[in-house]
Image: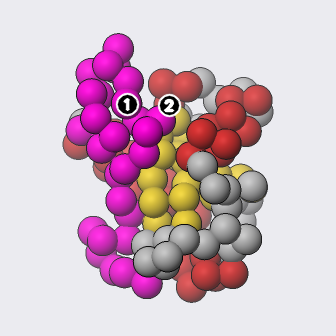
Amino acid sequence: MKTVEEVINKGDLAKSEVVFDGPMVKGVVDIRKGLLAIDADLHADLERMLLEDGSAQEDLWGINLWFEDDGEDFVEFDSMINVRPRQGNRSRDVENLAVRAKIVEVVEKWIK
């Protein structure tokens, strides 16, 4: 597990320690701090790492990065950590379009 600290190439995601069939890696984005954590079996593990580093839970959103896909197919907004009725998100998907845009902005900041 790691927080991305320098820009990485999309193709380098294939070298991650935890790559799922598809191929895909899991990530968690802190939309307030502009952080991206990757490289874990579970979104919850990445969420816990960011929480321990001072992130607020309401700012953390789970995603999947399909690094062989382009455009809208690259980022998938699907994770159990996204289910949070108190924030109006009642599914694994990220339902708020403004939050989705912030997530994509953070991903584009760190992955080229």
**Residue located at (47% from left, 46% from top):** 62
Left or right: residue 37 compared with residue 98: right
Which residue is at the front of the view, 60 or 5?
Answer: 60
Quadrant housing residue 25: bottom right
Confirm whether residue 111 shows in the render: no
User: Which residue has dot 1 on it?
Assistant: 83
Q: Circle 2: is it few (<14), some (14-19), or many (20+) Cα within 10 Å?
A: some
Counting from the top left corner in percent of width and height, residue 17 is at: 73, 71
Residue 37 placement (x, y as % from top left): 64, 52
| Magenta run includes residue 28 | no
- The amino acid on which the numbered mark 2 sits, given as a three-letter code, is Asp
Which residue type does callout 1 highlight?
A: Val
63 relative to 30, above or below: below
- In the rendered view, does 27 fall on the left or right side of 70? right
User: Residues under labels 1 and 2: Cα distance?
Assistant: 13 Å
Q: Position of residue 61 (x, y in %)?
A: 46, 40
Dominant secondary structure, magenta: loop
In terms of depth relative to the viewer, which is nearer, 40 or 68? 40
Q: Secondary structure at mark 2?
A: helix
Residue 21 versus residue 41 in the image, above or below: below
Q: Earlier in the sequence, mark 1 or mark 2?
A: 2
Left or right placement of residue 94 versus residue 4 in this view = left
Say whether residue 30 is visible: yes
Residue span colored magenta: 68-95
Magenta stretch holds residue 83: yes
The crowding category of the residue bearing disc 1, from other C-alpha atoms within 10 Å (few below 14, some 14 to 19, many at least 20), is: some
Query: Can you identify the residue that label 2 sits on?
Result: 59
